[in-house]
């Protein structure tokens, strides 16, 4: 996860300026009402609920029961919680820990809290159960899968969303029980296996998520594990930002030129989904400079905003983006 390719000199200040502009756009655009928090501070609040006797606290949360397992997550809260807040779910890949990936060192997603977001990093089962997340079979996950960042990306194709999708949805709903979450601005994103999991969330749960950032995620690993449901259904209004790292974007047996192209074709075929296909030259590791722009892009398109209203802004230096399917690979 070497993020040194892109300089961060002065990037944090640029991030706050860009995100502030996107915040205004996100609060005022969209066919769904209530995007202006000042005019209607409660209209977009997600009605949440938690497991019995569980209360969310700032920072680390453990003992969250989902599918019969005890799960963990870490939450970063903004200073202002008086009006509905956008929420971002950060999903790490195979190598970085959950808190490493969400940090300024890699993704800069943690800094979204400085601009009014609620940010949450759910933990993988391998982390919670103190098992090695990167490995094969008996030397790694102990259940025969190639690696275990997120279980749902490596189960046989079916119409069942999987335990991680259910955990993440339950986690978001529980957070909404204690803090004001804007139901029109719930997003997720991640890199590698975290990108795979983001794609899974968008396919199976676009009624909850308004958008996602899929950084070099698997779509159909060696044709054995397609992450999409067997019966493709029309996705809800949303936005998907995809990222390909160029010719050196490979990990193990996966060629992410193929994987990202398949994903872009899937989302571009959805009538209600804005698809933004981006390319860089950073290879497979997440590029630090991309996160703030991608998050601002998501925020500019709340759920319910017409696809035709989306305006693609200029990405950071070193990246190229197009609407729809990739044209460079």
Image (cartoon, rainbow, N blue to C red):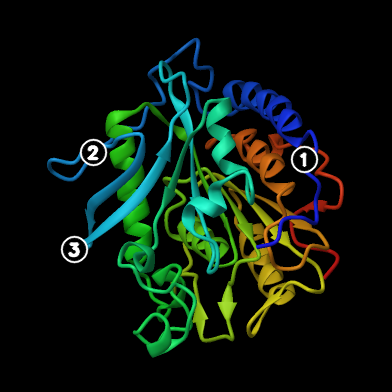
What mark, if any, has residue 68 been given in the picture? 3
The image shows residue 136, relative to residue 88, as above or below, that is: below
Q: How much space separates mark 2 and mark 1, taking CA atoms? A: 35 Å
Q: Left or right: 297 with respect to 327?
A: left
Can the viewer see residue 234? no
Mark 3 vs mark 2: in front: 3
In the shown orientation, is residue 253 left or right of residue 281?
Answer: left
Question: Camera-side residue: 242 or 310?
Answer: 242
Pointer 3 or 2: first along the chain: 2
Q: Earlier in the sequence, mark 1 or mark 3?
A: 3
Q: Residues within 10 Å of mark 2 (few under 14, many from 20)?
A: some
Under circle 1, the secondary element is loop
Asked whether disc 1 touches disc 3, contact meaning CB atoms under 8 Å apart, the reply is no
Q: Which residue lies at the image location 62% right of the left edge and 25% below the top edge?
A: 23
Residue pictured at 70% horizontal, 34% vertical: 309
Nearer the observer: mark 2 or 1; the answer is 2
- In front of the other: label 1 or label 3? 3
Is 58 in front, or is 172? Answer: 58
Q: Which mark is residue 312?
A: 1
Residue on which the image places disc 2: 49
Q: Look at the numbered disc 3 and give the secondary structure of its residue.
A: loop
């Amino acid at each position: 996860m070497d993020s040194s390719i892109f300089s961060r000199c002065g990037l944090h200040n640029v991030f706050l300026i860009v995100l502030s502009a996107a915040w205004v756009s996100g609060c005022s655009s969209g066919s769904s009402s209530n995007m202006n928090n000042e005019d209607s501070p409660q209209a977009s609040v997600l009605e949440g609920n938690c497991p019995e006797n569980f209360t969310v606290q700032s920072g680390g949360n453990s003992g969250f029961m989902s599918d019969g397992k005890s799960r963990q997550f870490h939450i970063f809260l903004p200073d202002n919680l008086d009006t509905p807040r956008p929420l971002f779910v950060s999903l790490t890949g195979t190598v970085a820990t959950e808190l490493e990936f969400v940090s300024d060192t890699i993704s800069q997603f943690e800094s979204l809290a400085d601009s009014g977001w609620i940010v949450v990093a759910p933990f993988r089962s391998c982390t919670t159960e103190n098992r090695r997340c990167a490995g094969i079979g008996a030397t790694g996950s102990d259940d025969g899968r190639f690696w275990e960042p997120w279980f749902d990306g490596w189960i046989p194709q079916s119409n069942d969303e999987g335990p991680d999708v259910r955990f993440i949805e339950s986690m978001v709903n529980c957070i909404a029980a204690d803090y004001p979450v804007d139901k029109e601005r719930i997003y997720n994103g991640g890199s590698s296996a975290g990108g795979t999991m983001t794609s899974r969330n968008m396919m199976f749960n676009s009624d909850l998520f308004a958008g996602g950032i899929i950084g070099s995620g698997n779509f159909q690993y060696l044709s054995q594990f397609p992450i999409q449901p067997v019966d493709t259904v029309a996705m809800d209004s949303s936005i998907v930002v995809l990222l390909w790292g160029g010719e050196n974007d490979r990990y193990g047996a996966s060629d992410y030129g193929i994987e990202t192209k398949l994903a872009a074709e899937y989302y571009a075929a959805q009538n209600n989904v804005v698809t933004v296909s981006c390319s860089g030259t950073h290879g497979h590791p997440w590029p630090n400079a991309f996160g703030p722009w991608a998050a601002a892009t998501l925020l500019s398109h709340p759920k319910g905003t017409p696809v035709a209203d989306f305006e693609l802004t200029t990405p950071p230096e070193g990246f190229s983006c197009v609407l729809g399917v990739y044209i460079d690979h």
